[in-house]
Amino acid sequence: MLVVMEAGARPEQIEAVVRQIERMGLKPHPIPGAHRTAIGITGHTGSQDPSNLENFPGVKEVIHVTHAYKLVSREAKPDDTIVSVGGVEVGGNGLAIVGGPCAVESLEQTRAVADGIRRGGGQLFRGGAYKPRTSPYSFQGLGERGLEILARVREEFDLPIITEAIDHESLQLVDQYADCIQIGARNMQNFSLLRSAGRARKPVLLKRGMSATLEELLLSAEYIMSEGNYNVILCERGVRTFSDHTRNTVDLSIVPAIKRISHLPILVDPSHGTGKRNKVLPMSRASIAVGADGVLVEVHHKPEEALSDGPQAILPSTFAQLVTECEAIGRVLGRSLQPALAASR
Amino acid sequence: MLVVMEAGARPEQIEAVVRQIERMGLKPHPIPGAHRTAIGITGHTGSQDPSNLENFPGVKEVIHVTHAYKLVSREAKPDDTIVSVGGVEVGGNGLAIVGGPCAVESLEQTRAVADGIRRGGGQLFRGGAYKPRTSPYSFQGLGERGLEILARVREEFDLPIITEAIDHESLQLVDQYADCIQIGARNMQNFSLLRSAGRARKPVLLKRGMSATLEELLLSAEYIMSEGNYNVILCERGVRTFSDHTRNTVDLSIVPAIKRISHLPILVDPSHGTGKRNKVLPMSRASIAVGADGVLVEVHHKPEEALSDGPQAILPSTFAQLVTECEAIGRVLGRSLQPALAASR
Amino acid sequence: MLVVMEAGARPEQIEAVVRQIERMGLKPHPIPGAHRTAIGITGHTGSQDPSNLENFPGVKEVIHVTHAYKLVSREAKPDDTIVSVGGVEVGGNGLAIVGGPCAVESLEQTRAVADGIRRGGGQLFRGGAYKPRTSPYSFQGLGERGLEILARVREEFDLPIITEAIDHESLQLVDQYADCIQIGARNMQNFSLLRSAGRARKPVLLKRGMSATLEELLLSAEYIMSEGNYNVILCERGVRTFSDHTRNTVDLSIVPAIKRISHLPILVDPSHGTGKRNKVLPMSRASIAVGADGVLVEVHHKPEEALSDGPQAILPSTFAQLVTECEAIGRVLGRSLQPALAASR
Amino acid sequence: MLVVMEAGARPEQIEAVVRQIERMGLKPHPIPGAHRTAIGITGHTGSQDPSNLENFPGVKEVIHVTHAYKLVSREAKPDDTIVSVGGVEVGGNGLAIVGGPCAVESLEQTRAVADGIRRGGGQLFRGGAYKPRTSPYSFQGLGERGLEILARVREEFDLPIITEAIDHESLQLVDQYADCIQIGARNMQNFSLLRSAGRARKPVLLKRGMSATLEELLLSAEYIMSEGNYNVILCERGVRTFSDHTRNTVDLSIVPAIKRISHLPILVDPSHGTGKRNKVLPMSRASIAVGADGVLVEVHHKPEEALSDGPQAILPSTFAQLVTECEAIGRVLGRSLQPALAASR
């Protein structure tokens, strides 16, 4: 923390700030300069927020220099975290390709898509049983019936399951049926849900909120880890900007930024990130090229009949091409596809 | 809904789109033009999403022209909704000024601030017992103990209470203790919580999400109303942009925009909207001048000791000035302050 | 400037940074802390940029704490600047209302609108002779013929003229014909044009760029002032965000923010700021309420026939109402309308 | 163009809109629906803007469905444009890697960097002689002396030159000395400069503005092409958003979006796009993977001494690695590096 005084601050104003910092149990370090004085602050800030110093006479601004996250940071754990999702590793040197429909609509549809994912070379399956929809009148998912379908499909195709939880009740069920609990972008700062996820047994896939900064994303992961669940996978899925040629703007540079300061794995979701079917393949390649640990994409065998988000789902044939191209690009970076689970049949 | 064909679309491609629209049970209206053909669509869209037409050969784009919200719209209810919060009306021709601390910290602090609000001319009291904080290590509020303090303060000062609920459990308690349930910006699209609020007995103050469009805000209100709770107050609290001189960018033009298409009342929160104490008074004046039904501001008698958001809280003396200036500006628009509740003592 | 070292930085790394700062002719101030060390920097930074220290081993980040603007700041000149535009004062305790068409289309149209501005109580006239248009195929203005029309209208109605220059050539002509040179949002960082404006004799109205920060706006004003032209009026005209209910998002809190750190006057343009006719009146009121020195609005006597930006122009009758309401709100803040020039006829 | 009437619009209101459309010389196509009527418009819109219909009674909104760009579009020219920059092709199946310092500082520095670019495998050289700087007090470039240095370096290293022009005067000189004229982000909507570039003999590299939409970028290219210069190369360099971990947010999905609707080549500039040295290599890989025709990066042999933008410049050794990795990723997409010019010595 650094307090910057105004150019014309008087000595007694500086002294008052110094005394207030000491009253807070912190250590002030005045740095007199040619034009103005700055005061560094060290020590453990407890319940009192030194930002308040901004309101003292003669103070120009208060600048924060340390971060609130601890468990997520590489300073706390230098080595990459590798998260096992039902036996498939996410993070480290491998790449994980996750595919599936936006929503579980029926057993037939889910089986058809899962067959495409398995044949196409994907290692993990995604599909929503609980759908957070902007309008109360849109299809909201099949609920527990959807989770049962996902569980059956996992047995048949040996694809571990990632699916979203939207509240405490659904989280208990997802923790029971699935292999990884997804927290969606709209719930990234639903701190009550994050704490529940931190007490679950399964790993958590945490999507970046639509206008979340890197620091906020890491602090939301910190909520989960601070409850004892250390198996967190981050996911970039596009942020909201003025740019209108895609639904969101995928912020790929967050991948190397996260890798630099955190040990957690990170995937990219170019389907929600762009909202356009024809952008999913090129943005998946770019995601692997920038250093992501894998991608998460929407696949549907009949996208024109999908009950939600059809325009962004790709066909199984495109998914197979995507796996092939991502694998080839991964090799340039010295990475290879994680092995899929051995077929049990 | 309007389907725009590419300039070189062939007749059989147009015909295929027309047939698909009919297969969906909708009515196509082809409009041939000099350069290209467009196809209007009317009828009730059920489970199938015509957006999928974007993937038909020869289609350039699909444009949505109707909105999903119904109950919130002026087409459904032409007259302004007036919501009674513990006997104080919000909406209509009156103005409501809501003040209080960011967080309830103690009975003494809450009483001191409430005394300032009452003397300053405020009609409603706000204060958080459950605080959604970006970091898991920040003060999270006093919980039910905070609600008890708020209830005591209401009795003593005749100020109805608005306070935030962050999950189902806290919502039940807030519904029991308070006069109005606040849903915060981070939970604007926590649809599960919105449905719970729709089943509560008390009115709901719904804050705009940090990157929510006008339509998304209205659809979140629609979630609450679709469950039967018609007493919804909207609240603009700033959106996230690149602009860095304030914490958020207050989007005041949403006030007349909402008034035009919805019957619901709308307040502005310039404290969270700007994050700067010295912007609260001018932005409160501007909020009333643009046509808001009132403002919601943070007040603290010792802001430099506040446990959260101290730098944006104003002093009780500034609050009194704010009420006076808002009242004077309201008169220019033919509006007057709502009467506060008669002191019961 | 402050250099923050990493938690595990070694003493010799800190020493290397300290020596490099000294080599740059600056003074280092190391501040050892419990977890990490920070190093304050004072002195005059010349051609070498201390940001480069970010690349030294053990350095976490480099934080800038001083600003590059000088002449625009209140530290340089504590009193408000009042700019005379053809005899009408902008800034200080008065309010200036500027109206006129987006584009000068003909003498008849310009006279008709000017008559409405004069009768409605406006003191300054605006109208574009050079129009920066997004498409090369849109109407680009009448050029010098438009300036001649503006000059004739000034004589007839005693309304000083503000009009836009888009390059060196048009700037020479605008400087000759008009009373104030407008630099549009798209040219806010056309530094070559800013320097030319700094050498002109007439005052300059500088509009904020579509994604300019407060600091960038002030630095663009600094360009003009550093060439010797101290008569600069700033203008907020909305910034580009995701919010789609208006064309831009008007950032009214920049008005008190500018007033705090700069002595320059600032107007608001709610016509371009919202792009919607029905938002101009309420946002004009809000602009005065927040503390702006006036507003700049588009007026057209037949907006449905305007050659550019018709949907945001208001009618002369609405303009008269706007002047009345702005005057009433100004009185609440102790401000009054500047007197218009005495009619010369 | 489509006019959407309100749900309760009366027949005479619809009739009035229809008549007005006809008065404009356009053809109305009313589409009655269950809830509301829409009216399609076809024909050539001349000077009158149908947006004005938004102000007719009973009209809900007016929606634009056609685009203003013509020459830049694939509808006008289906095949990819390949632009020759001093003999090196940009566009088509090849990849072009452009490197060089932010600013030309001296002959020695420029030669040292050019040697690194040539040895590292780059085909084109970039370096600024005219620098648009946010502050008037920052280094503004060497001007014509810088162009002379660039010309000498081209002769010595057989690297064609791309350099920025900031006004008419510098554009004439750049057109004379260099192989490609860069128009920077801040000048993307300096329409007067775009027209001058359209009359130059050399190709133009047009950078996307900091808050420009895809459509605005294409329309700025249209300005250049409409003056007769068809050799335009587009360049994504990041847009301004709330996201603060990089200086700008690189919007890679614009690459496939541009490829779909335009025949022009597009490069990516990850140096300005991220502002961080350690993000340049991963974002360059991602740019090639998403389908860009090459990258443009800042290289400096002593970045810690650079007079501008040092923190984002990479070392020549990193540049060589970047070329190798981009080439390997290009092969996955069936693309190969353009051959550099044969060394003339």
Image (cartoon, coloured by chain):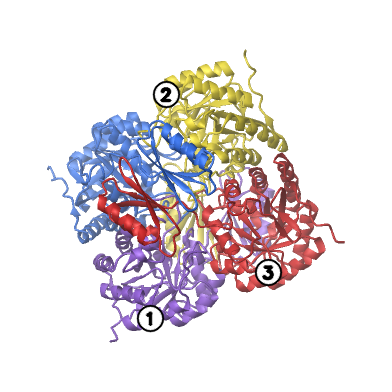
Chain colours: A yellow, B blue, C purple, D red
Tell me: A39 left or right of D156. left
Give the residue at x 70% y 35%. A328
Residue A49 percent across, percent down from the top left: 42, 47
**Numbered label tally:** 3
Give the residue at x 31% y 30%. B196
Q: Residue furthest right?
A: D345
Residue A218 seen from this side: no
Query: Marks 2 and 1, how far apart in space?
Result: 70 Å
Q: Residue furthest front?
A: B11
Indicate which disc residue A142 carries. 2
Crowding near pointer 3: few (<14 within 10 Å), some, many (20+)? many
Q: Amino acid at mark 1?
A: Gly
Crowding near pointer 1: few (<14 within 10 Å), some, many (20+)? some
Give the image quarter of residue B198.
top left
Tell me: C232 left or right of A159. left
Q: Amino acid at mark 2?
A: Leu
Query: Marks 3 and 2, how far apart in space?
Result: 63 Å
Q: Nearer the viewer, residue A105 or C256?
A: A105
Give the image quarter of residue D49.
bottom left
Q: Chain of mark 1?
A: C
Q: Nearer the viewer, residue A40 or B232?
A: B232
Q: Chain of mark 2?
A: A
Residue B18 percent across, percent down from the top left: 45, 38
* Rendered-image quadrant of the N terminus of chain B: top left
Q: Amino acid at mark 3?
A: Val
Question: Which residue has dot 3 on it?
Answer: D174
